[in-house]
Image (spheres, grey):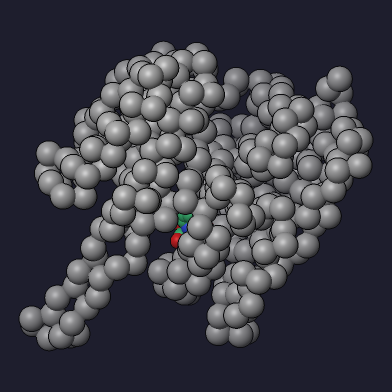
């Protein structure tokens, strides 16, 4: 029996609702598969922990997560605590501390889900967005001087390193190579940003030479938003900087029908540290506690986690179940349905038991 240690950090808002649903489905999946089992360590870190202890996770937090095979994360953020405090207090220290430099975001239109794009169906939109996750615009480099004075100044410096750009390009070309179309779009802004982004383009071209079997093109980020809406069929794998991909992937999620279905993995491709899997949505204060959070993003995320652990068969079975449940119209209100989180979860567990 293959055994995996999962660190579960549901954190805030709807995080505990969707991660609870995801763990239930993972249990059903492990029971059906019979070949692996999951030992889950539960961590109560997040905004409640902050209110009690003044920090979002204990000082030895990373040390405690280190032994996990993967981290299953909900969302962090509370109305009464500034977002930069929650984000930099929990999620980013894990991403950066474990050098999870590739943020992987698959997007497609699930059966039964309607895209806001008129005429777009599942065959028109099937993307994999790779986001640089360790530097760029979110490197945290910068500062403020003369606080509160008329001459106050703030800088937020984007950092691009040869190591950082080359490794994300290689990872993206590898991802593109594994997909049937072998097609990669490198998103850039080198017309306006002539240092970091020109460097980004140069390294893309260098790495591309090692992947003659992958077709690649370059697109300016503003033009990319139009292409995503107008010609979604021309896109397959995408690589973009931390900021650009952050924005593009929210657009991607909306075009696929809802933020509530979009998953992500924060991956250390070299597997020196545990990778972290999470829905891309946040804590969604407006629906917290109502029992209607869409758990599909956390299911899809769980499937990515299983894939990463090497359980490809179970990962595929999970996605088959997601597709069956969506196609059957068992959808939460964000997708125009009437089902609750619990009803979707129950339908998933039944679907999993029915897959052979
Ligand atoms: P959000 O993703 O929490 O919500 C945006 C909208 O989408 C809301 O109307 C919400 O109800 C809806 N939504 C999101 N997930 C849903 C789901 N699973 N099912 C149904 N509807 C869903 O983004 P927002 O409002 O910008 O941020 C709220 C808090 O979450 C903030 O504190 C923010 O910093 C934090 N946040 C945390 C993230 C993380 O931990 N990775 C990511 C994004 C935001
Ligand atoms: Mg975002």
Q: Please state which of residues 320 and 207 is positioned toward the viewer in this rendering.
A: 207
What x and y, as percent, mark residue 350? 84, 30
Left or right of 321? Residue 14 is left
In the picture shown, does residue 163 fall above or below 224?
A: below
The residue depicted at 34 percent of the width and 46 percent of the height is 165
Q: Please state which of residues 233 and 343 is positioned toward the viewer in this rendering.
A: 233
Left or right of 197? Residue 243 is right
Q: Please state which of residues 17 and 232 is positioned toward the viewer in this rendering.
A: 232
What x and y, as percent, mark residue 153? 14, 75
The residue depicted at 62 percent of the width and 69 percent of the height is 62
Q: Please state which of residues 330 and 30 is positioned toward the viewer in this rendering.
A: 30
Quarter of the image with the C terminus is top right
Q: Quadrant of residue 146?
A: bottom left
Q: Hey, which residue is sitting farthest front in the picture?
A: 210
Quarter of the image with the N terminus is top right
What x and y, as percent, mark residue 222? 22, 36
The residue depicted at 26 percent of the width and 58 percent of the height is 158
In the picture shown, does residue 75 fall above or below 281?
A: below
What x and y, as percent, mark residue 225? 28, 32
Residue 318 visible somewhere in the drawing = no
């Amino acid at each position: 029996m293959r055994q995996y240690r999962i660190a579960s950090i549901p954190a805030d808002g709807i995080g505990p609702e969707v991660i609870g649903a995801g763990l239930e489905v993972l249990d059903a999946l492990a029971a059906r598969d019979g070949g692996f089992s999951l030992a889950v360590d539960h961590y109560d870190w997040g905004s409640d922990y902050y209110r009690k202890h003044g920090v979002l996770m204990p000082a030895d937090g990373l040390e405690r997560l280190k032994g996990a095979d993967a981290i299953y994360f909900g969302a962090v953020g509370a109305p009464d605590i500034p977002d930069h405090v929650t984000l930099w207090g929990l999620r980013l220290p894990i991403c950066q501390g474990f050098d999870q430099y590739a943020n992987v975001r698959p997007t497609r239109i699930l059966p039964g889900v309607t895209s806001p794009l008129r005429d777009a169906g599942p065959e028109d939109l099937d993307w994999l967005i790779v986001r640089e996750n360790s530097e760029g615009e979110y490197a945290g480099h910068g500062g403020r001087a003369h606080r509160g004075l008329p001459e106050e100044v703030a800088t937020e410096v984007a950092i691009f390193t040869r190591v950082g750009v080359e490794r994300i390009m290689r990872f993206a070309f590898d991802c593109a190579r594994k997909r049937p179309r072998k097609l990669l779009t490198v998103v850039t802004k080198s017309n306006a940003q002539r240092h970091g982004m020109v460097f980004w383009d140069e390294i893309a071209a260098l790495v591309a030479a090692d992947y003659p079997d992958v077709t690649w093109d370059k697109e300016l980020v503003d033009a990319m938003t139009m292409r995503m809406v107008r010609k979604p069929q021309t896109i397959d794998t995408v690589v973009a900087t931390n900021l650009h991909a952050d924005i593009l992937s929210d657009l991607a999620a909306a075009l696929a029908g809802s933020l509530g279905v979009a998953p992500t993995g924060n991956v250390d491709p070299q597997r020196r540290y545990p990778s972290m899997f999470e829905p891309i949505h946040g804590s969604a204060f407006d629906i917290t506690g109502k029992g209607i959070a869409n758990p599909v993003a956390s299911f899809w995320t769980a499937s990515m986690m299983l894939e990463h652990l090497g359980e490809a068969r179970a990962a595929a079975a999970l996605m088959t179940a997601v597709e069956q449940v969506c196609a059957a119209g068992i959808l939460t209100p964000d997708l125009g349905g009437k089902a609750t989180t619990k009803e979707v979860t129950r339908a998933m567990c039944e679907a999993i038991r029915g897959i052979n």
